[in-house]
Image (spheres, rainbow, N blue to C red):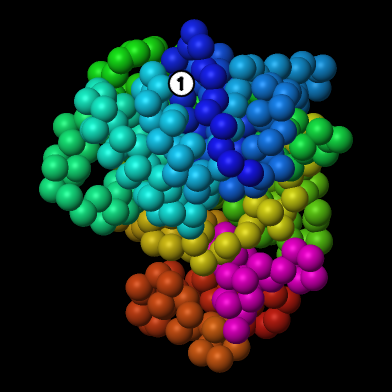
């Protein structure tokens, strides 16, 4: 259907790309509480229509008590509709956020480039772009895609002067949530949204967003979250899968899995404290680990291990949640055997049927065709005679239930 201009009286505007559970339940909710009229940009027509018809949605806080937040006023556009994108660009827009997934992120370059061109033509001032993705340097990845999309030198100069690309770390568990209303989301009560203060532009309107913490040491927060929450989440999922657990709650409730995840987080934690002390003290990080384990044990979060463990190749990239803390430990000669167990478990993740994952299937095919030693060596960059590589393979065979040739 043709786009009809949205009336947005009386409030500053935030444009959120991605109207999924994270976009609505986390980022959109925080922006709404800060006083923005949140406009969601998505490709799913049904969700866009529903947001425009209702003008609001509910977020259920899953902490054992009945707590429901109503997020309003909200609107929505189709993110590929350039007429709609141009219209939103002309409103009092000061922040653009994303929650679309790392693989989709570069596709946003086209609509955001249109926003930049429109604002430049209209003589409008700065805005900030914050990619709230579960990926290190996500905002930088988006900036690079935008540079390719903007062919005109004047456009690139305008972007350099007027667009803040704010790197951030986001942390909130938003599991699939069952409801008769497609807009309703369920989230845990805990959340963190930390942004690099040096990358923010002063905007008009310039709003202090309660719930978004600006810091001068974002790297510490990014790695703390990635190498604690995401590391623990992934290892719990992969060990849970191997033990036929359906959810993270079931996995972490198993004493053996809980102990393994805890040991892995203390290994990564020792490296984090060593790197960032005194920014993180041992005591502070111990409390953070305990908070993470407590969050995994929330009985109101029904997060499936197949969802948390999906895309194992992405999670096995160097610097990510599995190999990242291993390398940090290796650099400091710190214990990391339990983290290597997590790497081995990821190599055995292979859900089938409705939960089949393309990356997991690819891993299994490569292991079958090339052998486990070569696959581990390719993923890690370690030579096949390295002790850590041999340890991963030994754990791989142990978890698989086969005798290891190296025992």
Q: Is residue 182 above or below residue 29?
A: below
Residue 356 belongs to magenta span: yes
Q: Quadrant of residue 118?
A: top left
Count of marks, rendered view: 1
Q: Which residue corresponds to mark 1?
A: 13
Q: Is residue 302 left or right of residue 287?
A: right
Instruction: Mark yes or no: residue 361 visible.
Output: yes
Q: Nearer the viewer, residue 325 or 125?
A: 125
The residue sitting at the top extreme is: 10
Q: Where does residue 238 sit, x and y in percent of width and height?
A: 66, 59
The residue sitting at the front extreme is: 2
Residue at 60% across, 53% down: 234
Residue 208 belongs to magenta span: no
Q: Is residue 3 above or below residue 142?
A: above
> Which stretch did the figure color magenta?
342-365
Q: Quadrant of residue 338?
A: bottom right
Residue at 76% across, 71% down: 352
Q: Nearer the viewer, residue 289 or 214?
A: 214
Quadrant where the N terminus is found in the figure: top right
Q: Is residue 255 above or below residue 367?
A: above
Q: Is residue 348 above or below residue 47?
A: below
Residue at 65% across, 52% down: 308
Disc 1 is placed on an element classified as strand
Prevailing secondary structure class for the magenta stretch in the rendered image:
helix
Q: Nearer the viewer, residue 279 or 167?
A: 167
The residue sitting at the right extreme is: 180
Q: Residues within 10 Å of mark 1 (few under 14, many from 20)?
A: many
Q: Where does residue 93 sit, x and y in percent of width and height?
A: 39, 23
Q: Where does residue 302 sit, x and y in percent of width and height?
A: 78, 41
């Amino acid at each position: 259907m043709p786009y009809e201009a949205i009336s947005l009286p009386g409030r500053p505007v935030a444009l959120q790309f991605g109207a999924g559970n994270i976009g609505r339940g986390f980022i959109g909710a925080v922006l709404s509480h800060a006083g923005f009229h949140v406009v969601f940009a998505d490709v799913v027509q049904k969700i866009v229509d529903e947001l425009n018809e209702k003008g609001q949605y509910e977020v259920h806080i899953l902490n054992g008590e009945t707590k429901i937040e109503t997020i309003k006023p909200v609107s929505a556009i189709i993110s590929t509709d350039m007429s709609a994108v141009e219209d939103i660009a002309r409103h009092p827009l000061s922040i653009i956020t994303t929650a679309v997934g790392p693989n989709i992120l570069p596709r946003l370059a086209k609509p955001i480039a249109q926003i930049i061109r429109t604002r430049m033509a209209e003589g409008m001032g700065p805005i900030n772009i914050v990619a709230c993705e579960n990926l290190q340097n996500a905002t930088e990845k988006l900036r690079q895609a935008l540079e390719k999309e903007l062919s005109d030198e004047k456009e690139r100069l305008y972007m350099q002067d007027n667009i803040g690309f704010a790197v951030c770390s986001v942390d909130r568990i938003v599991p699939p949530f069952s409801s008769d209303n497609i807009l309703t989301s369920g989230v845990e009560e805990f959340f963190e949204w930390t942004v690099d203060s040096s990358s923010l532009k002063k905007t008009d309107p310039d709003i202090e967003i309660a719930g978004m913490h600006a810091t001068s040491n974002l790297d510490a927060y990014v790695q703390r979250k990635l190498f604690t929450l995401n590391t623990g989440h992934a290892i719990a999922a992969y060990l849970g899968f191997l033990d036929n657990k359906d959810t993270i709650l079931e996995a972490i409730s198993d004493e053996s899995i809980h102990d393994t995840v805890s040991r892995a987080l203390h290994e990564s934690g020792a490296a984090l404290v060593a790197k960032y002390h005194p920014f993180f003290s041992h005591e502070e990080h111990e409390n953070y680990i305990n908070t993470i384990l407590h969050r995994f044990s929330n009985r109101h979060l029904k997060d499936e291990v197949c969802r948390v463990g999906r895309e194992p190749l992405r999670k096995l990239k160097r610097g990510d949640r599995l190999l990242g803390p291993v390398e940090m430990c290796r650099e400091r000669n710190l214990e990391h055997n339990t983290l290597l167990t997590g790497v081995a478990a990821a190599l055995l993740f292979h859900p089938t049927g409705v939960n089949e994952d393309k990356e997991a299937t690819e891993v299994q095919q490569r292991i079958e065709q090339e052998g486990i030693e070569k696959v581990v060596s390719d993923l890690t960059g370690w030579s096949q005679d390295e002790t850590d590589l041999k340890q991963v393979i030994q754990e791989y065979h142990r978890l698989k239930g086969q005798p290891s040739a190296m025992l």
